[in-house]
Amino acid sequence: MKRLKASKISVALLWLFCWSFYSTDAQAFEDYPGFSPLSNIVQFKAQFKEASAKIQSVKSEFIQEKTLFALTENITSQGKFWFKRTNKVRLDYTTPFTYRMIINGDKVLVKDDHKENRINVRSNKLFQQINKIMLDCIQGTILDSKDFTSRVFENEKGYLLELSPVNKSLKDFFRNIVLVIEKKDYSVRSMSLNEPSGDKTVITFTNKSLNTQLQDEIFTF
């Protein structure tokens, strides 16, 4: 259970950095069928930075499938997600269990059926590192981040970003992170978190609403 909770915390933190990369090779066609290496990285970086600045808020539903290396069955859960620039996030798991996480600035609330925890980002080194990544994304400078090596691919409808952590503490959590981004509005279609153990979490986002008015009370605790 602790492993699952840590996974959900990582998902929520990474969502901050997802909303707010650059070698190519033949291996891409084997790794990601249907995608080909992106040819114009400079243009993509400029477009990505411009699009990131336009996304001020997100409201979405999601389906999460967790595949544990030691088990044959997937663990499927559903919930709702809110994001408001610059650093407000709320993540509610509603099925098959209830779990809430709210990030508001440097304060974090984690709540389940049994207890409630409050965390100060400044007192947690991992949170600090992910907070730095988040700020890089919000400012559109994640493409120049030294925290990841990356590859970028595309097809007719979207871009695929493969991010492999360089920092050792991040490597302990993830082998790589794969994002599929819509070309039409640069919103995240899906996110895959691949762990060193072989466990995998795939999150697919549905019913997305961008740049709608979200009350600050959603993120208050």
Image (cartoon, rainbow, N blue to C red):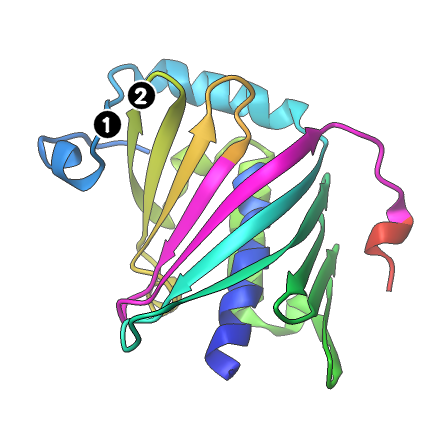
From this viewpoint, which residue is outermost toward the bottom?
114
> Which secondary structure is most common in the magenta stretch?
strand
Marking on residue 221: none
- For label 1, count other residues whose C-alpha is less than 10 Å away and answer few (under 14), some (14-19) or many (20+): few
Q: Nearer the viewer, residue 26 or 206?
A: 206
Is the residue 131 above or below the residue 52 in the image? below
**Residue at horizontal 85%, vertical 32%?**
213
**Residue at horizontal 66%, vertical 66%?**
121
- Which tag, 1 or 2, sits closer to the chain's start? 1
- Side (left or right) of 56 relative to 167: right
Residue behind mark 1: 34
- Quarter that holds the C terminus: bottom right
Residue 87 in view, yes or no:
no
The residue range painted magenta reads: 189-216
Residue behind mark 2: 155
- Residue 86 x %, y %: 72, 41
- Side (left or right) of 150 relative to 89: left
Q: Are marks 1 and 2 in contact (CB under 8 Å)?
A: yes
Q: Residue 194: within the magenta?
A: yes
Name the amino acid, label 1. Answer: Gly
Q: Nearer the viewer, residue 217 or 76?
A: 76
Q: Nearer the viewer, residue 23 or 90?
A: 90
Task: Give the quarter of the image for residue 35.
Answer: top left
- Residue 123 x %, y %: 64, 74
Q: Secondary structure at mark 1?
A: loop
**Residue at horizontal 29%, vertical 59%?**
175
